[in-house]
């Protein structure tokens, strides 16, 4: 293939071609770039091709959430009961109403239960019943069965806490390595078989501590160096209900409470009174965690919340899809080729075009929630998933990254010193994706350089 033909196929400048010649194939990549403050497209290549966007799909979810929920949206967790409270004893069941707060953790649960103690409850003489009606259905993430124990594949849930992760925290006491479970799930026994290690440094503690789970026992073995004092690793145990129930019981006991007698699911009766209400931090704080660190579980929770808070049919997943598509229609953005599964990009089926995602970026940057949306994106060379990438361009470049086995993706903005902004989308689908990340970065960098030169009036 001649150099001229390659240039025509890639439809990018000679500089970009020189950087990627012999690396990227024309049919592997889609590119689109346009100034936020302008109307003309600056550059494009296969911009209408339906591509797997990986985690850049989270930008669609963030855009929909800000527009449908608003930046002041907060998730509400409640404890209710229709039982009599007598001399510190709640003589019946306690209902925990969860609504999928993506940042709910042990700190939030502790505060919820601390307020229950302040309310005068000492003992729960009934069951803890989880009211899970906020999400009628959980979106799928098909094709990741082999990663079921990985944190990135934990499904969302109305009562998700700590992303369903228990931490193993390591320390030394009287010359012996110790390990504790945080939170201290009462249904598990921790079998510490660690021995002192001689290594001078710790590095990744998982290189020294082997963790195995068998039934209700967690065994930790290996040789732990003194330098690992203060280190931590995670272990993924229990299903969502089991984790929520055991976390509740552990923290309730730490606060001096007694009970409950068990855990199950149950709908809150109409005559139940509110005992405690706890609101989350506002939506933008969740979006910052999601986009900077590409958290799939949290993104899926936000996407389901968009569905749950929309005028709905009773199917949370269908309502989330409808909310996104209706917003596209309202903003005059083409509905195709968008395909949604869970709004996080943890999907073999989700598709979008570079042009469609670019139109969403333009709408977000020109809309009332531009500051919240853009602030959620990683800063090049500084934080999140861009901490070690694009250091030469620095924090004027903000991009959401996307990574799957056969996908690498980048989408976001570059801002010139003059304040003018360029929206950029680059999607790469290829069996060679892992090898081509550097070439994709080079392509984005070249687009930015050409746009900067154009602003300065250079040829």
Image: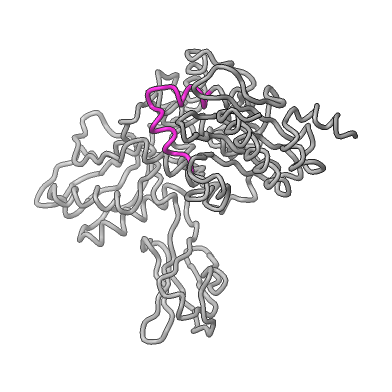
Furthest-left residue in this view: 87
Q: Residue at x 68, y 38 (%)?
A: 443
What residue span does the magenta drawing correspond to?
360-378
Q: Nearer the viewer, residue 93 or 355?
A: 355
> Does 193 sit above or below residue 249?
below
In which quadrant of the rendered image does the C terminus lie? top right
Q: Give the image's coloring scheme.
A: one colour
> Does 450 sit above or below residue 164?
above
Q: Residue at x 50, y 72 (%)?
A: 220
Percent across and percent down for residue 405 are 68, 46
Q: Residue at x 45, y 81 (%)?
A: 226
Whether residue 199 is in magenta: the answer is no
In which quadrant of the rendered image does the N terminus lie? top right
Query: Does the rendering let one see residue 186?
Result: no
Q: Is residue 439 left or right of residue 37?
A: right
Whether residue 371 is in magenta: the answer is yes
Question: In which quadrant of the rendered view does residue 76 lie?
Answer: top left
Q: Residue at x 61, y 37 (%)?
A: 449
Q: Nearer the viewer, residue 399 or 71?
A: 399
Q: Is residue 4 left or right of residue 307?
A: right
Question: In which quadrant of the rendered view does residue 27 lie?
Answer: top right
Percent across and percent down for residue 320 are 48, 25
Magenta span dominant secondary structure: helix
């Amino acid at each position: 293939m001649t150099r001229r033909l390659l240039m025509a196929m890639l439809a990018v400048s000679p500089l970009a071609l020189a950087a990627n010649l012999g690396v990227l194939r024309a049919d592997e990549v889609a590119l689109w770039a346009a100034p936020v403050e302008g109307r003309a497209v600056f550059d494009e290549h296969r911009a209408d091709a339906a591509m797997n966007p990986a985690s850049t799909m989270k930008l669609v979810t963030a855009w929909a959430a800000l527009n449908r929920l608003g930046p002041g949206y907060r998730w509400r967790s409640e404890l209710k009961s229709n039982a009599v409270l007598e001399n510190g004893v709640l003589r019946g069941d306690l209902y925990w109403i969860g609504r999928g707060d993506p940042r709910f953790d042990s700190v939030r649960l502790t505060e919820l239960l601390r307020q229950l103690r302040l309310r005068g409850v000492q003992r729960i003489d009934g069951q803890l019943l989880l009211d899970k009606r906020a999400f009628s259905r959980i979106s799928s993430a098909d094709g990741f069965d082999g990663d079921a124990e990985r944190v990135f594949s934990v499904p969302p849930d109305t009562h998700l806490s700590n992303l369903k992760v228990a931490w193993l925290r390591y320390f030394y006491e009287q010359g012996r390595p110790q390990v504790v479970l945080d939170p201290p799930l009462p249904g598990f026994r921790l079998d510490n078989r660690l021995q002192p290690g001689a290594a001078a440094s710790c590095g990744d503690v998982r290189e020294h501590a082997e963790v195995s789970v068998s039934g209700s026992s967690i065994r930790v073995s290996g040789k732990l160096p003194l330098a690992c004092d203060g280190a931590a690793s995670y272990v993924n145990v229990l299903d969502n209900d089991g984790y929520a129930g055991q976390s509740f019981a552990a923290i309730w006991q730490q606060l001096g409470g007694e009970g409950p007698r068990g855990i199950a699911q149950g709908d809150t009766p109409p005559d139940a009174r509110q005992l405690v209400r706890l609101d989350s931090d506002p939506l933008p704080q969740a979006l910052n965690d999601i986009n900077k660190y590409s958290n799939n579980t949290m993104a899926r929770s936000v996407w389901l919340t968009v569905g749950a808070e929309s005028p709905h049919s009773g199917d949370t997943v269908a309502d989330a899809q409808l909310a996104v598509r209706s917003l596209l229609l309202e903003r005059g953005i083409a509905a195709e080729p968008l395909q949604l599964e869970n709004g996080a990009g943890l999907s073999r089926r989700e598709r979008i075009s570079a042009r469609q995602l670019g139109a969403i970026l333009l709408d977000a940057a020109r809309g009332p929630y531009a500051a919240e949306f853009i602030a959620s994106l990683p800063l090049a060379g500084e934080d999140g998933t861009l901490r070690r990438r694009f250091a030469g361009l620095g924090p004027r470049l903000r991009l959401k990254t996307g990574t799957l086995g056969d996908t690498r993706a980048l989408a976001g903005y570059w801002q010139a010193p003059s304040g003018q902004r360029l929206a950029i989308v680059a999607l790469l689908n290829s069996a060679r994706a892992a090898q081509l990340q550097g070439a994709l970065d080079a392509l984005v960098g070249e687009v930015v350089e050409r746009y900067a030169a154009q602003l300065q009036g250079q040829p």
